[in-house]
Image: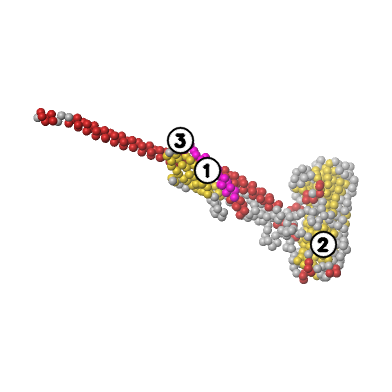
Amino acid sequence: MSKQIKNQRGSALALALFLVVIISILGISLLSVSSNSLKQVDYERKDQAVFYIAEAGMSLAKLEVKKELTEIQKDSYEQIKKWIKDENMNRKNAKPPSCLTKAEAEAKYREILNSKFEAFPLVPNSYTISAEKVASIDLDIDIPADGAPLLYHIKIKSEGSIDEAKEREVTQEIEIKPSLPFSENVDCGGGDGEDDGHLPSPPLEGYSVISTGNINLTGSGKITGNVSTNGKLIYGWTSWVENGTIGVTGPDKIENIQASGGKNKVSQIVPPININPVNYIPKSFGDKFNIPGNIPYLSSYPALSPTGTNTTLGQNGEINLGYNERSHTLLLTEHDTKLRKLSANENTSLTIDLGNTNGEKNLYIDNLNLGQVQISIIGSGTLNIISNNISTLAGSSGIKIKDKNTTALNLYYGGSNELFFGGDLVFEGSVYNKNANIKLQGSPKFFGNIISTGKKILVHGGNATANGMYVILPYGEVEVSGSGKVKGIVMAETITVSGGSSEIIFGEPFVPIETESDKEITDYPTPDAADNLFKTKETSMIEK
């Protein structure tokens, strides 16, 4: 027994050592497992943190992108608005004028948007979320091709990183659909192109006479320049067309072509030009003859200054300039001024001052009687003299505009009695007549046009113009007789040149006019700012 005990001495130590080893191994294993778990937790924490950094960078980048989209939306609208305004003005002033179309406006808007998106600024290429935690940003912008729907795509890539080691990347796309409705095409006044009133190219060059009816040449009547008629050209035996072509629908529309010893040649015949004189009547023609009843007659002083012993400014709005009265000035300060009567006797003068403001000023006169008076018009803008009763415009009278700016003076006559211009009258403006016949006799000098919707214009004797003019009478006859002469372009239903050395000769009109089609040119409307929208749609965020 005692021997057995002795034999077991040291076994406890071995067991203890064994247990220590086992426990140490277990401890080391537990420490290793714990360490790996901590590392895994740290990895997952960093991995999740990097994702959050990328996500935060994406959110910040989207804020910057949307801010820039708001600027593009505003700037592109202002640019297209200005472009439409400028384009409307340029096209109105072009020869021939034209209208802006919806397709052109939409194309320009696309061009503006493309340039904006192509120059899209790179949002900050990185955001520092916190120390050593950075989100790097990259943008990719897709511009729609011509003809493709107007859709823009911005792809945002955000890459999160910590200590430049761990990285995760997310992407998201924003679709932008600009919505700015443009109006349909405006009425450009061009019609179907068959009779739209536009001047041929070059505009009426060389045409002295254009008729929708017949052209009658009798006696020694003569036309110098091109002739066009939709009716007949009827020659007298001593009349002819010189230095021009004859526009008719066919040779059978010419009678007595062998008149004047063969001066009129068959080889001169060409098709007539497609011009309707009606299109040369201004659209607002009829409105100008209406004298408003709510305008008070002028009665206040010093509208007329100075006064003289033979000059009166009556309380009823009358201005009567007596014999030899000079140096009077009528200052027109209002847009509309109304007189009951303007009368001037022999050897008088009057200055009408329009002031320094541009635009039109209307002088309505119930009764106009100008005999041997010199009227000078100064100032800025255009003066329209409107009267339904004109008794005298003759003798050595003159109505003259400063610097011969004859586009700035118009006389509108709405009466029914004959409108007579005689003697050596000088008129530096244009005449618009509603109903009456017009007669020019002697040597009146016009530096403007005569446009009438009456039935007759007679030029008898002397020279009707000092420069070229338009004489337009769509519904009646223009007759030049008794050695009368007209230099310019005559357009009428019927045109007669008769007797003596009467002649119509082509001359470039001193005052240009617009055709009715030109008057119909309408501004293309600017889109409404309230309709200027950028519709956006975002895809889901995707991790690469």
Residue 516 x %, y %? 72, 57
The residue located at (84%, 48%) in the rendering is 375
Mark positioned earlier in the residue sequence (2 or 1)? 1
Separation of residues labelled 2 and 1 (CA atoms): 72 Å
The residue located at (57%, 54%) in the rendering is 146
Mark positioned earlier in the residue sequence (3 or 2)? 3
Q: Secondary structure at mark 2?
A: strand
Separation of residues labelled 3 and 1 (CA atoms): 25 Å
Residue in the foreground of this view, choosing between 466 and 10: 10
Q: Secondary structure at mark 3?
A: loop
Q: Which residue is mark 3?
A: 132
Q: Secondary structure at mark 1?
A: helix
Q: Residues within 10 Å of mark 3 (few under 14, many from 20)?
A: few
Question: Can the viewer see residue 84 in this picture?
Answer: yes
Mark positioned earlier in the residue sequence (3 or 1)? 1
Residue 357 x %, y %? 75, 43
Which region of the structure is painted magenta? 111-134
Which amino acid, mark 2? Thr
Q: Which residue is mark 2?
A: 224
Q: Which residue is mark 1?
A: 65
